[in-house]
Image (cartoon, rainbow, N blue to C red):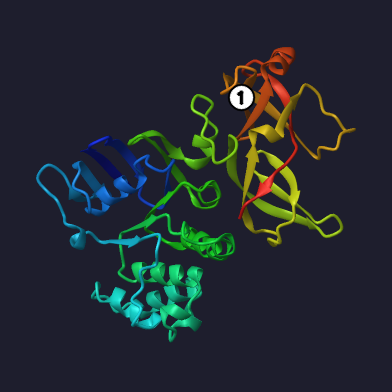
Amino acid sequence: MSIAAHFKLAYPGFALDVDLDLPGRGVTALFGQSGSGKTTLLRCIAGLERGVGHLSVNGECWQDGDTFQPTHRRPLGYVFQEANLFAHLTVQGNLDYGMRRTTSADFPRHTAIIEMLGIGHLLERKPERLSGGERQRVAIARALLTEPRLLLMDEPLAALDLARKNEILPYLERLRDELEIPVFYVSHAPDEVARLADHIVVMDAGRAVAQGPLAETLARTDLPIRLGEDAGVVFAGTVLERDPQWHLARVGFDGGELWVRDGGAPVGHAVRLRILARDVSIAHSHHDDASIMNLLPATVVEQAGEDHPALALVRLRVGNTSLLARLTRRSAHALALAPGQQVWAQIKAVALIG
């Protein structure tokens, strides 16, 4: 299962030129600054912009040199920044409108979507009586009830304040884990990408400057991807223990274990961890007399320059997991770091992000 999206489109002052081969399942984040081409690419995929190229979705051709399926014939759902609900209809009426696009009477599936998004108690309300987060959850449900084979989401949380965003993110995480269709998620918000994406496409000036699985792409040193203030990595773990005395949790991952602030996830629960390069230092030996709790044996993979000539970015391998460490070039020289060298990664902070 895969999606091939190859588009060229030119406007005065802007040109889109992308050649993407993407997974046919999971969440692919289209990430980049405003004006980088994220929404234009999404509109090409939807058929709202007629770029020159080719688009196939899990073996089905939607566009090539001889074929152009118009938007209404593409089996996709589209969620915008604004919920765009019909104000004169109840939530149930808005959902019924979505279901008119399909001839299916899969009521158990429809019920599951309503339950998944936690809107069952809102069905008789009009949109004016919903919070921003509730309206967006209804909009997502309406898109899913059309039974799309691809879901497009164009910065669906951009219009929400932080409280409403935090309210809806757990529902989006559940969609990521339970949906069997691919999702393209446009965002310039680092926290959303870190929490939701399985795959990432980094856009800049109409081109895809990087693409690949989230964990692998964020760990690149040749083109460090900064989700916000710094380079860093995101990877999966499992809660192994919770320590109520110190409000910490022990999380296992493919490479070892880490102590993090307890976020309330139960033992056995899958979580995502984010470690910034600035929070990782390197030592030749294990130090027990330091405040840093997380020390892991690691192997140096490679070293690259950073934006400032005083800094270096070092990629480490801990088991099968990559970490990035930001050091001064002076420190890297003093440690005589080289590929294959065995060192200790000292991790000062770990964020549990979902």
Q: Is residue 187 above or below residue 165?
A: above
Q: Nearer the viewer, residue 46 or 144?
A: 46
- In this picture, residue 257 sits left or right of residue 154: right
Q: Nearer the viewer, residue 212 or 237?
A: 212
Q: Is residue 122 above or below residue 238?
A: below
Question: Disc 1 marks which residue?
Answer: 313
Label 1 sits on what residue type? Answer: Leu
Q: Nearer the viewer, residue 144 or 225?
A: 225
The residue lying at 9 percent from left, 45 percent from top is 66
Residue placed farthest to the left in the image?
66
- Which of the 4 quarters of the picture holds residue 322? top right
Residue 57 seen in the figure: no
The residue lying at 30 percent from left, 69 percent from top is 146
Residue placed farthest to the right in the image?
289
Q: Nearer the viewer, residue 238 or 153?
A: 153
Q: Is residue 350 above or below residue 155?
A: above
Residue 231 seen in the figure: yes
Mark 1 lies on a secondary structure that is strand
- In this picture, residue 154 sits left or right of residue 323: left
Quadrant including the C terminus: bottom right
Image coords of residue 318 (percent x, y): 65, 33
- Which of the 4 quarters of the picture holds residue 153? bottom left
- Local crowd size for mark 1, using a 10 Å CA cut-off: few (<14), some (14–19), many (≥20): many
Q: Is residue 316 above or below residue 304?
A: below
The residue lying at 73 percent from left, 29 percent from top is 281
